[in-house]
């Protein structure tokens, strides 16, 4: 498996992603805003941009990310 292109360590289980946090011009250059919920695995991947959100102190924190499966929020887990 390949590690995700971008990893964000977060302190909350509920997160939002629009794919454009670091892009000048903002959300018009990203993707639709989606709300992602981290479950007992400790991480969730955005289905649009593949950003991985890892809960600090959770089971996926400190693990080699290339060993974890893609894990979207909702269908297709």
Image (cartoon, rainbow, N blue to C red):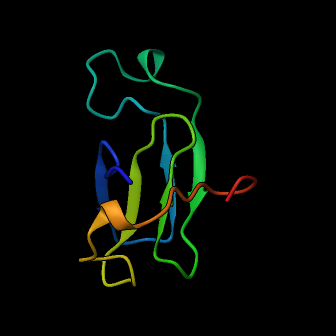
Q: Residue 31: image x %, image y %?
A: 53, 26
- Judged left or right of residue 55, residue 41 is right
Q: Quadrant of residue 20?
A: top left
Q: Quadrant of the N terminus?
A: bottom left
Q: Nearer the viewer, residue 66 or 74?
A: 66
Q: Nearer the viewer, residue 63 or 22?
A: 63
What residue do we see at 59% from left, 54% from top? 72
Q: Nearer the viewer, residue 75 or 32?
A: 75
Q: Nearer the viewer, residue 27 or 40?
A: 40
What residue do we see at 32% from left, 60% from top? 66
Number of numbered discs: 0
Q: Quadrant of the C terminus?
A: bottom right
Q: Is residue 21 above or below residue 73?
A: above
What residue do we see at 50% from left, 71% from top? 13
Q: Residue furthest right?
A: 75
What residue do we see at 40% from left, 59% from top? 53
Q: Is residue 21 above or below residue 23?
A: below
């Amino acid at each position: 498996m390949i590690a995700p292109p971008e990893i964000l360590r977060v302190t909350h289980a509920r997160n939002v992603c629009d794919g454009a946090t670091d892009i000048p011009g903002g959300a018009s250059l990203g993707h639709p805003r989606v709300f992602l919920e981290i479950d007992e695995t400790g991480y969730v991947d955005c289905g649009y941009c593949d950003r991985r959100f890892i809960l600090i102190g959770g089971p996926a924190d400190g693990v080699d990310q290339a060993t974890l499966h893609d894990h979207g929020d909702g269908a297709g887990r």
